[in-house]
């Protein structure tokens, strides 16, 4: 891997948006159910005969005025209720992957929430089968490499997480890791200590949402009790200097989601976001879209809007893209290929 960073001082500020859009990147924090656009929610509701509590696409969009994580989750789980067949899951993932290709996403690791679906009588085979088929087809047809990470819903019990794992194990070759999402405060990582230990024994990659709305203490226990390899969000790490030092020392990646943080009122505006502080402190931060259909933008929107809010330059753009490949769960040869392409893109912008 090329360890030298390209000279980035000569990239003119007005060329930065084009560079942000064109640079190859990985997306490591995208809930595939959060890519369901209102138009697709209504199309699937019609296809499946599901009654929605909203009269129109416009009325649904108007409900996207969130005040915190829970206010979003209520609508997000309602939106996912239109997903019933293997083809529905395929169509949802394929639509996201097509958009990701346009944003020059070369590799994506997609979260999915099986408990949202199995609780409604949809089988694990239907969920994983449709999502995995879309990933496989995209590798051949769209030229984007994608894999799946199964998330446990942390507002449910650890026993239910174990049941979900059992249901998923017949399909273990179709997902690469497990994560932890849903309402954070009051549901600390250590609630899932045993199921994560089991997943670790089984050889899965481990990640967890921590320090989005919850305290820095949850990031410590995600690392030390769950033994996760990346922290999803993690922006509250800034509250704890010892934690910042640990994250920097161990190169634990944070999958930061600026537009999500803005829409869920974690920061009052993008200019107040702490992404630059995290990067400048030596943390392996990345930029991601989280739930792009709900938060007003896909990956390139997250990059361009965050950089437009100021205080970040081409050197940060390079770091973010490079971190995204280095923190991904692909092999070293694939990382090198992506980073070589990244370097070539920056060369062309000098
Ligand atoms: N946090 C927790 N759970 C989620 C999120 C998030 O940002 N998006 C979808 N489920
Ligand atoms: Zn998330």
Image: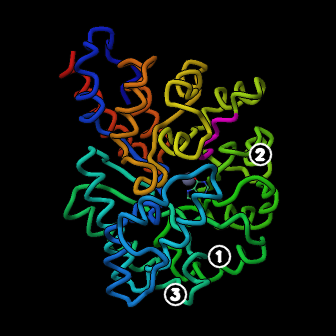
CA gap between label 2 and label 3 equals 32 Å
Horizontal arrangement in the rendering, residue 216 relative to residue 208 (left or right): right
Bounds of the magenta segment: 231-236
Q: Which residue is mark 3?
A: 122
Image point 44% across, 47% down: which residue?
A: 289
Q: Which residue is mark 2?
A: 218
Task: Estimate how packed mark 2 is, as few (under 14), some (14 to 19) or many (20 or more) residues with alpha carbons within 10 Å.
Answer: many
Q: Nearer the viewer, mark 1 or mark 3?
A: 3
- Spot occupied by residue 193 in the image (x, y as percentages of width and height): 79, 60
Sequence-wise first label, 2 or 3? 3
CA gap between label 1 and label 3 equals 15 Å
Q: Is residue 323 above or below residue 175?
A: above
Q: Is residue 254 above or below residue 10?
A: below
Q: Is residue 27 above or below residue 242?
A: below
State yes or no: residue 233 in magenta. Answer: yes
Q: Quadrant of residue 332?
A: top left
Sequence-wise first label, 2 or 1? 1
Image point 27% across, 27% down: which residue?
A: 17
Q: Nearer the viewer, mark 2 or mark 1?
A: 2
Q: Quadrant of residue 184?
A: bottom right
């Amino acid at each position: 891997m090329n360890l030298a960073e390209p000279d980035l001082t000569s990239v003119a500020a007005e060329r930065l948006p084009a560079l942000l859009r064109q640079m190859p990147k990985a997306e490591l924090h995208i809930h595939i159910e959060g890519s369901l656009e209102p138009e697709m929610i209504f199309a699937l509701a019609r296809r499946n005969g599901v009654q929605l509590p909203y009269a129109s696409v416009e009325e649904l969009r108007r409900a996207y005025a969130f005040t915190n994580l829970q206010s979003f989750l209520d609508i997000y789980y309602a939106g996912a209720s239109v997903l019933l067949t293997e083809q529905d899951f395929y169509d949802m993932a394929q639509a996201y992957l097509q958009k990701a290709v346009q944003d020059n996403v070369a590799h994506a690791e997609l979260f999915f929430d099986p408990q949202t679906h199995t609780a409604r009588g949809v089988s694990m085979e239907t969920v994983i089968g449709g999502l995995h088929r879309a990933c496989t087809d995209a590798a051949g047809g769209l030229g984007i490499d994608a894999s799946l990470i199964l998330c446990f819903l942390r507002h449910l019990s650890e026993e239910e997480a174990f049941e979900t794992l059992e249901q998923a194990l017949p399909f273990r070759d179709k997902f690469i890791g497990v994560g932890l999402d849903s309402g954070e405060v009051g549901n600390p990582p250590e609630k899932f200590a045993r199921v994560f230990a089991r997943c670790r024994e089984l050889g899965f990659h481990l990640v967890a949402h921590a320090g989005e709305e919850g305290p820095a203490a949850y990031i410590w226990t995600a690392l030390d009790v769950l033994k996760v390899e990346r922290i999803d969000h993690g922006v509250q790490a800034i509250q704890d200097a010892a934690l910042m030092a640990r994250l920097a020392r161990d190169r634990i990646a944070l999958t930061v989601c600026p537009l999500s943080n803005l829409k869920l009122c974690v920061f009052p505006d993008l200019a107040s976001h702490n992404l630059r502080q995290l990067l400048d402190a030596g943390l392996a931060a990345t930029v991601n879209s989280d739930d792009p259909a709900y938060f007003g933008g896909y990956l390139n929107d997250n990059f361009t809007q965050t950089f437009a809010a100021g205080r970040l330059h081409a050197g940060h753009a390079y770091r973010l893209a490079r971190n995204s490949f280095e923190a991904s769960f692909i092999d070293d040869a694939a990382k090198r290929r992506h980073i070589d392409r990244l370097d070539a893109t920056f060369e062309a912008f000098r």
